[in-house]
Amino acid sequence: MAVGAEAIFGDSVVTTRLDEAINWARESSMWPYIFGTACCAIEFMSVASSKYDISRFGAEVVRFVPKQADLMIVAGTITYKQAPVLKMIYDQICEPKWVISMGACACSGGFYDNYTTMQGIDQIIPVDIYLAGCPPRPEAILDGLMAVQKMSKNESILKDRVKNFKGLLDDPKI
């Protein structure tokens, strides 16, 4: 007869799967990197202030170095000149990473339909959550953060490693 750890140790030991423990830590400590270019970046400041208090949701450590972040929030108008910079910064964020497109300009170019403005950042980087508005309300930003946290619960360390390893095996240089 097999005896489980709970039967042997009682309440003194907590057992779980590694993926669940890591995903709980990820969900509880999102580190956002703000790529703010216009009014939406100003609206994000109110979310980080004491009235809306993004720290209640585990995202109070706003990073200014992309290598230390796991959530990128693009807030504002993105021009074609800025696009390579945005892509370079996105590439510096370690996996797993998530992107929130905040506001009408980042989502679809807003009312700037001209030759200099990108009509949505999803043309150059993948976007996980789109927040509508000009600018979006602070409550919408918090909803977007909670949606990313729900997405992070479905990550798997093993599946990510296997996927990356298979990608290396497919590389003709190796």
Image: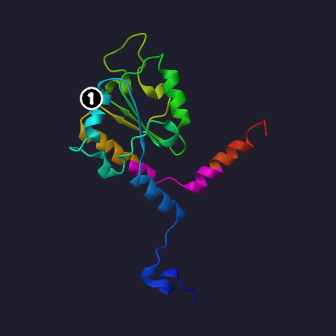
* Residue in front for this viewpoint, 167 or 27: 27
* Residue linked to disc 1: 135
Please state the total of marks drawn on the protein image.
1
- Locate the C terminus and report the quarter of the image it occupies: top right
- In the image, the segment drawn in magenta is 149-162
Say left or right for 143 vs 10: left
Which residue appears at 49% of the width and 37% of the height? 66
- For label 1, the crowd category at 10 Å Cα-Cα, with few meaning under 14, some 14 to 19 and many 20 or more, is many
Secondary structure that dominates the magenta span: helix
Which residue appears at 69% of the width and 47% of the height? 166
**Amino acid at circle 1:** Pro
Say left or right for 155 vs 41: right
Question: Residue 126: horizontal and vertical position, in percent?
Answer: 49, 34
* Residue in front for this viewpoint, 54 or 170: 54
Above or below 143: residue 13: below
Say left or right for 67 vs 145: right
Which residue appears at 27% of the width and 32% of the height? 43
Outermost residue on the top side: it is 115
Question: Residue 56: horizontal and vertical position, in percent?
Answer: 29, 52
Whether residue 126 is in magenta: the answer is no
The answer to whether residue 101 is visible is yes
Question: Residue 97: horizontal and vertical position, in percent?
Answer: 49, 42
